[in-house]
Image (spheres, rainbow, N blue to C red):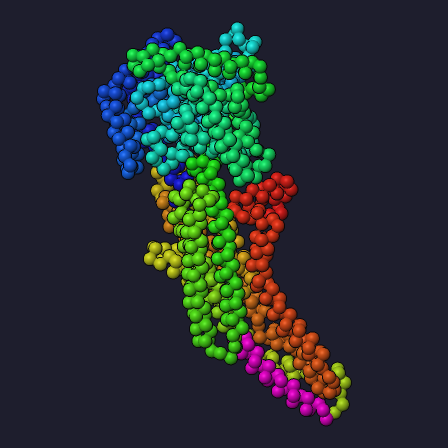
Amino acid sequence: MGPEEYKSQLQKEKQQIRKKLSEYELSTAMKSFIETLSKCDKQRRDYFLKWMKFKLTAHSESANQLSSLHNELKDHCDKKEKDVQTIAELVQTLLESSLGVEHYMREMGLIYEFSIKGSRNTADEISHLPGLAAEMLLDGLPLELLDGDASNIPERWVTDVLMELHKKVGEQSRLLVLTVLGVQSTGKSTLLNIMFGVQFPVSSGRCTRGAYMIFLKVGEDMKHEFNYDFIVLIDTEGLKSPHLAQLEDSYEHDNQLATFVIGLSDVTIINIAMENSTDMKDILQIAVHAFLRMKEIGKKPICHFVHQNVSGVSAHAKNLTDRKHLLDQLNEMTQIAAEMEKKPSIKAFTDVLDYDMDKNNWNIPGLWHGTPPMAPVSTGYSEAVADLKKHLLETVKTNPSSEVSQIPEFLKWIKSLWKAVKYENFIFSFRNTLVAQAYDNLCKEFSQWEQQFRKEILSWLQEAELEILNSDNESEFQHFNELAESKKFEVSEKITSEKRKMEEKLTNYYKKKGQHVNLIEKYKIDFFNSISSLAKEIKYSVNNKLDCALHMKKSSKEVQDILRKYRGVIEDKVMKLLSDCKDSKRSDEQLTEEFEKMWTGVTVNVSGLKEQNISENIFNHLKKNFLNRNVNEELQNAGDLTEIGKSEFKARTEHVRNPKTFNLFRRKDIKMYLQNKADDVIESCTRFVLDIVKTNTDYHECFTKDLLDKIDGSLKNISKEVKIKFEFDLKLHICGIASREFLNMHQKFLSDKDPQTQLEKYKIQYLSDFLDLYKQRDDCQRKANNFVRCCIKPAVEEFINRSLGINIVEDILTGSNSAEYSSRSYFQYNIQEELLQKDDFNGFV
């Protein structure tokens, strides 16, 4: 599915969901929930929410048997042969079986967003909801920042809630953003709860996903020491969930979440245990790599590592060694990422994130002193957390940030960062930087193999085309057909051989011990498929060029046969004129005048090549393209093809199935989608046609076949909402453009190859021969010059032009700057760098 079709499908699904929701009123539960929150004062509201949380937790655990679901999920994950589909279904069942206050709050936000954007006339009823949520946020209730189930930020809801909060505090909302990040079940929420006395949900038995934030107001007595009005705490779901890790996109989900929350933070606490340090190392590598690929993030988040369940001097000493080893690995991966992204100034992990191995590491013992649930809380845990909090606050006091953001700036940053994260989908799909580097290295190698493949076939094609074009003009057309067919068979064998060589290179590459090829085993089949697609593409292209060469040869033979006939007549007439004039003495002017009379008499009736009906040929191919597709009426009413496509193509309502079922905005969306699609296809096809015209060849029907195939490829993934009429009108429009361009090309070819025109080129030569023979002069030097000018020079120029393209590419790929073209990413990077430095986009047009 193409990106445009996918986008259209998502838009359609969104409209269907909105339409379905608009048919229902608010549920009794949501009405009661919103009314209660709206009418109660702070104390009663807190009491209501607390009891609601207890009741929902008890109901979920009893009605849905969450513990049995957890156990079943754990059993499936522990199996050696994991059933990914079953695990995914169990995860979804667990999510659907969980119900908490946060789900009601999420629903309230969705009701607000839907009512603001939709057609429901409930704006007055829900307009107070952001203010209500802002009050609850000030009271310490977490606000969902990132919906983990949908991997989406409800931007309108979050924006309006925080802007209401901004107003309520008199627009004094300087923020210090602190985030805790870590692998699942490492005590992240507990750490924040104990450190700041907040109530992020913990041990609820639910599988809540996403990110939540709490606003802590800085007391008036401490504002003179701090440069902030609020400390924003962001708690995230656990990374590397053993359940979600079985799913194919788990790397992407974790990497996106980590990058987003670290990017938002002024301070990030990485909650880590040495047994899962590898997982966190992988995630941090990708986060750093993503920061390097995205535009400048504008700040350098402070990073603290918290090692939980650590006690004793020996454990501390061991952790010191492990921490140094971890930092060395992160530094190495950062250098690799910086090299891939062409940022030589980045040398270490600390160039991207602010981290001091001596000061930003904390060892915290276990929470419980003994075995839960009867064990007391460890005093060592509390003391260590208190020390961490004290250090964080002291750091804030002594090193106040010069760029403190308030809520409006924070919201802009959320939108900007989330947009960057959503668009950066390549690097997030890898487990870590080593995988990304291994993939990039293979892409470079593959690019070289592909170029070698193309070079071999193009070199062969040059020789084959010359053999066809230079074959004996005395031969019959059947001989040319047989020669072309033999060349097609030969190239098929050669392409198969080159494909096999390329597959062997790929197989041998995966057998290497270096370059971490084991990390990219999952992409192996994709590269083999790319080789097959490349071979098919080259074979199709070469066969078309051989057909064009055959057509050119046949046209050339027709011209040469006519020229041969008339040159024989002219030579006889010249010799007769010479014998007639030898009996009398004449001047050059008189001889020239006699020659002109003879020449005109011979060439006046020279017949040219027959002009093809280009528009009819193109239209016939269009008919075949729509065979049995119920467009006979449109074909009959099409009119003169050369008059079509002169005005701009316009997407119309009649191009869409059942347009009346769409509302006004939906109709505009689908119409804009069709117009953009049509403009792209027309532009691409027009370039394709003009590139053919530039070759100064004669028209061949394969050009139209290729053009229609190109359009079919562009429309392959078009939305199913689009009627066949859109496809027909678009193809008719493009064929109209092509008919005029191909007709001009054909007429120019006929003019250049016209036998009378060709004979005119020899007129001066025949006149000179006639005068030399009459006066019995030595004409060897003149004939040698004519031979060089008319025969050798054109042949040399044609040979150079034919081989120039391959030689230029070879020189580029093997020259001193070959690294710039070694992979697509490097090539794109260098183009963008040159655009920035020279600020001259027209230089690339």
Specify the quadrant of the image occupied by residue 493: bottom left
Q: Is residue 713 magenta?
A: no
Q: Is residue 590 visible?
A: no
**Image spot of residue 611 (x, y percent):** 51, 69
**Image spot of residue 175 (x, y percent):** 52, 18
- Which secondary structure type mostly characterizes the magenta part of the structure? helix
Pick whichever, 402 or 783, lies toward us: 402
Q: Is residue 681 left or right of residue 776?
A: left
Does residue 95 lie above or below 706 as drawn?
above
**Image spot of residue 602 (x, y percent):** 61, 82
Q: Is residue 110 left or right of residue 328?
A: left
Does residue 225 lie above or below 646 as drawn?
above
Q: Is residue 87 left or right of residue 287?
A: left
Pick whichever, 415 or 630, lies toward us: 415
Q: Name the residue at 41% across, 12% down.
A: 380
| Residue at the outermost top position | 221
Q: Name the residue at 62% across, 83% down.
A: 570
Specify the quadrant of the image occupied by residue 205: top left
Pick whichever, 488 or 493, lies toward us: 493
Q: Name the residue at 50% across, 71% down.
A: 468
Q: Is residue 660 visible?
A: yes
Please tell me how many numbered marks the rendered image carries: 0
Q: Name the residue at 42% across, 31% down.
A: 278
The residue range painted magenta reads: 558-583
Q: Is residue 567 magenta?
A: yes
Quadrant the N terminus occupies? top left
Does residue 439 lie above or below 580 as drawn?
above
Pick whichever, 678 or 552, lies toward us: 552
Q: Is residue 296 left or right of residue 199?
A: right
